Amino acid sequence: MLSSGTRIGPNVIKSWLVEGSCGQSYECERNDQFAKKKKYFVKLVFRNTSEIKGFSDFFTQECQALQQLEGKGIWPVRDFGVMKWKHWISYDWFEERKILLNEGECREVIDKSGENFLIRSLEDLLKINTFQMKHQELLAVMTDLHIGMHKAHSNGFIHGNLKPSNILIRQLNSQKWNAWIAEIGLYRLSRYKNQSGEAKEDQRIPFVNLEAQDSLQEAVKFRPPFGNMEDSPEESWDIFALGQVVRQTVDSLMISSEEQDQWLGWAEQASRAGGFASIAHSMKALPGVKNLSEFGISLPPCENESVADLEKIRSRREREWHKAEKLSSLKFRRNMTGFVGIMGFTAYVFSSVYLYFLPAPWTEYSLEGALDSYQLGAGLWSGQAWGILPGAYDDDGDGGQNVVGEWNKEGEFFKLSFRKFKKINKKNSDKKLWQFIGKGSTSPDDYHKWTDYLTYDRKREVLQMMKRVDESNTYLPAKTSQQKPRLYPKERISRSEGKLILAELSFEREDESSVSWELFIGLGFLLASSLYQRELLKVESVKDIKD
């Protein structure tokens, strides 16, 4: 038993209600933003059942199907979940009501203890000896129960544990009653151990609560003596239970002897082996029911034919559920692989267009036989740039260090602007190094500044040095007959009388991989998406095998 304040999923326990044959019941309040403080009835599966291997998958599958089961006569499942060993199912809270007199006033019904008696279930009503239910009232209750049971059976669900405590009733006015079947499907969940193949384990639920033992004994009274109780429940179980419910109700609440005979005759047939072939046949035989079509129910084509094999119905429903799960999985995989494929192909197209007009970003373009190299950051008109410090701008005369700058597109040129902080001359400077730190602490005179102008040859994928400009000179690439190309001051080239001739100074791309990973990923995932689409169409075209 869990204590008050314990969380079960989005629910917080307010109080423990009862321990029955199918689990523990709690009054809870919702603790999320969607239904804050709303009351719910929560059923907790016994721990020794929930810890059986494979139960969690079975529990989830059953509850997903039960959530779809709604309509007249059914008190539906609202939510379910799993928290470690706690497997829980929640229902809307069903408020207790007082009974109304014909005049519409509240009747104070006093039980043996002298306390006010409120009605929630048929079990509560049967405990009131002074109340008498009329024929039309009982017919309204049994009609609702049959409609709900018919829908449950049509979807492959047998209650198997129907009894007055699982029948919720409410008096709408002094002449009309409504009824709902509660806890459909819980008996099958509680018997999972018997179906799991763990024959060596004790199959009995270890009840520690006398109330649970009483509940189990009470449930036996509403199960037929014919048939094997170790098997899965059959439709005849619920028909038998309805017959027993009517017998108890007539004995306790009915007053007219003629009406009692009609209802007891119906209950006798419902409680007999082979009495009614189906719930539809049972409802047609109810005293006062004339036409089933007004309830949206029809009899099988032949009234003498045997009841449908509910295991086949369940098997078909499970196949349909597995098919829907497979379709959902295939659609998700198709959409995800298609999305990644489109993104990869789009990246390939974008990179191809980009590389047609601009150098490859973050890729080193180096000069053969020298340390000089350049890298350009991504950008359409400007971006960051990296280069190698020339020895002319290194106060120590070495050069070769990495230097960071910016590039801008200027016509056909890529204009790379760099600067390097000048080394402090301690003799001539009256400032310390730390005094240069901070915004506005330095001036342009404190830096070596130079600008390299390059063009991009997209056919060869090389950057060509066109010129370098600093504060004092303009440098052009040139060479002598014996030397390789390098930068010379423009004036020196013009005064060399032809000894220095202009030359090409090309920086080649080091990463020359011809493999386009964007295209490879894009086409690969698009192919995978097409294969999932093909498998999806194949699964959708397969028709379910008829039972």
Image: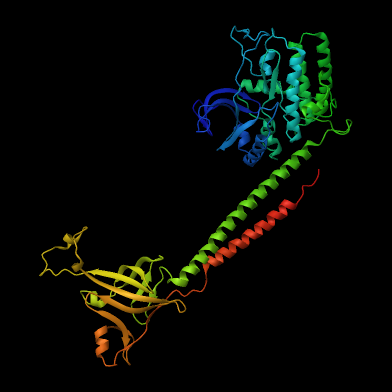
Q: Residue at x 18, y 68 (%)?
A: 445
Answer above or below: position of 193 versus 373. above
| Quadrant into which the N terminus falls | top right
Q: Which of 366 and 185 is in front in this view?
A: 366
Q: Is residue 133 left or right of residue 383?
A: right
Observer able to see residue 271: no
Q: Nearer the viewer, residue 74 or 374?
A: 374
Expressed as whole percent of the image width and height from the top left, the position of residue 105 reads 63, 8
Q: Within the image, what quadrant is residue 507 found in? A: bottom left
Q: Within the image, what quadrant is residue 450 found in? A: bottom left
Q: Residue at x 27, y 83 (%)?
A: 490
Q: In this view, does 364 lie to the left or right of 210?
A: left
Expressed as whole percent of the image width and height from the top left, the position of residue 298 reads 82, 30
Q: Which residue is drawn at 70% across and 16% down?
A: 176
| Quadrant into which the C terminus falls | top right
Q: Nearer the viewer, residue 423 or 507?
A: 507
Answer above or below: position of 480 versus 436. below
Q: Residue at x 56, y 63 (%)?
A: 522
Colour setting: rainbow
